[in-house]
Image (cartoon, rainbow, N blue to C red):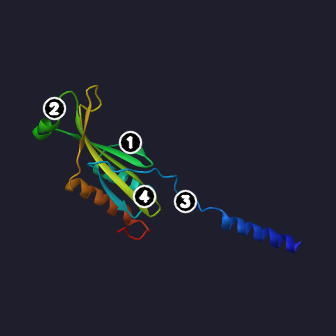
Amino acid sequence: MQKLLAIALLLTVAACQSSPRRSSLPEQPTLDAPSGSQSVTIAASPIAVRAALVSSATEKGTPVVQDEPNMVVMERTMTGENPALDAEFGPSDNGNRVIRIRVRFTGDQCRTLAVQDLAVINNARTALEQSFVLPGNPNTMESLQGLKSRAEQGSPCPPVI
């Protein structure tokens, strides 16, 4: 009886050791960084990155219009006249003009790639809506670096260089 118990125990241990390790994260998508976007590698999980994005937007009063496991989209409504944007993208005279910030991210427990891209939306949520890609700039990269710092604050992961 003891031999049978010992064999069963050994088989159980062997089965546990030979089974493939599964990540606690769901399968992650591949991610590309299109022209004009900005990216940063973060020493935290995609779950932590998403939480940092949503909490930061909430604190700043920035509406989150799409909240997915690997993407968060936020919008800021622009108020008042903006002759520079009117000259570049045309007027937004049939609806609001918004800046749409999309951050996509993918990775594993300690290494997440975050890609941010921006768009100006003229006449948002109307039949005349038009979207124009904005190139990244130092201000938007600073925002992405802020996300990196915030997500890494509670992370047990070593810094990504």
- On residue 48, the disc is 4
Mark 1 vs 3, N-terminal side: 3
Judge by depth and name the residue closer to the eye, 150 or 45. Answer: 45
> Measuring 38% from the left and 57% from the top, which residue is drawn there?
113
> Measuring 40% from the left and 45% from the top, which residue is drawn there?
67
> Measuring 10% from the left and 38% from the top, which residue is drawn there?
83
- On residue 91, the disc is 2
Please rate how many residues cluster around mark 3, counting C-alpha atoms within 10 Å: few if below 14, some from 14 to 19, many from 20: few
- The amino acid marked with disc number 1 is Gln
Mark 3 vs 2, N-terminal side: 3
- The amino acid marked with disc number 2 is Pro
Please rate how many residues cluster around mark 2, counting C-alpha atoms within 10 Å: few if below 14, some from 14 to 19, many from 20: some
Q: Is residue 115 left or right of residue 94?
A: right
Q: CA distance from mark 2 to mark 4?
A: 38 Å
Numbered-mark total: 4
- On residue 66, the disc is 1
Please rate how many residues cluster around mark 1, counting C-alpha atoms within 10 Å: few if below 14, some from 14 to 19, many from 20: few
Mark 1 vs 4, N-terminal side: 4
Mark 3–mark 2 CB contact (< 8 Å): no
